[in-house]
Image: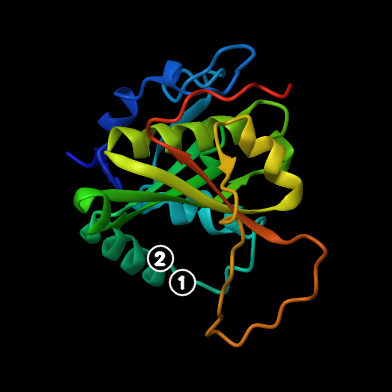
Amino acid sequence: MSREGDELALYDPKLLHELEFWRSPAKFNPPITAIAPGETWMKVRPLQEGDYDRGFLELLSQLTKVGNITKAQFLMKFAQMRASGGYYVTVIEDTRINRLIGSATLVLEHKFIHGCSVRGRLEDVVVNNTYRGKQLGKLIVVTVNLLAQHLGCYKMSLDCKDHLIPFYETLGYVLEPGNSNAMNIRFDGAKEAPTRDRSVTMSIAANATNPVDPS
């Protein structure tokens, strides 16, 4: 059942109990997992239908422009994502105040290549800036990485700014020689200010060996 308590969840919460954190090259000190995130008041779980009221959109606004989204719009998008079965928005909740403090999204791309396999994409990674220093960024990314592997993805990819490359390398991502540039075409008419950070593409293969930890 895709429920967490009395609320509808975006995906089955039991999946998080099946993740094997020892498979990740990430180093946690002290050790934490999605089921034991380090604090009794923290909970890692799927996005739920009630998370509009727990500040999900406000959290995303720390990452990028969100827009003036109504609760009805949120619930419609939630239902569409849940029905498609290819979206795994995973969040961290501070249960003391019923607010979301971290989030990352796994998007599944179904392919004809690689034997009709599935590729995962890491999107919309954000941690509330008042909760830094608790390994939450690492935790939410590793959770989604392992979820992708558990669901049978042959590769997990992301686009990131140059200054984030060392962080993602510690989590197993590598720059692919000759294939590390991200290009986009926008249809929303948005004009972004020039930036010195270019966007690069990184990936982690399901059968990759553990890289050396640069820390």
Amino acid type of the residue tagged 1 in the rendering: Thr
Dot 1 corresponds to which residue?
A: 70
Residue that extends furthest to the bottom in the rendered view of this protein: 189
Quadrant location of the C terminus in the rendered image: top right
* Nearer to us in this view, 35 or 146: 146
* Nearer to us in this view, 127 or 185: 185
Using a 10 Å C-alpha cutoff, classify the residue at mark 2 as few (fewer than 14 neighbours), some (14 to 19) or many (20 or more). some
Identify which residue is drawn at 48% across, 49% down: 157
In this view of the protein, can residue 94 be seen by the observer? no
Amino acid type of the residue tagged 2 in the rendering: Phe
Give the image location of residue 86, x and y in percent. Answer: 29, 54
Dot 2 corresponds to which residue?
A: 74
Identify which residue is drawn at 48% across, 25% down: 209
Q: Is residue 72 above or below residue 29?
A: below
Q: Marks 1 and 2, Cα distance to the nearest angstrom?
A: 6 Å
Name the image quarter holding residue 66: bottom right
Q: Is residue 101 above or below residue 59?
A: above
Identify which residue is drawn at 44% across, 25% down: 34
* Nearer to us in this view, 124 or 71: 124
Give the image location of residue 18, x and y in percent. Answer: 29, 23
Give the image location of residue 193, x and y in percent. Answer: 78, 76
Identify which residue is drawn at 44% across, 16% down: 22
Give the image location of residue 7, x and y in percent. Answer: 29, 44
Asked which secondary structure carries label 2, the reply is helix
Residue that extends furthest to the front in the rendered view of this protein: 178
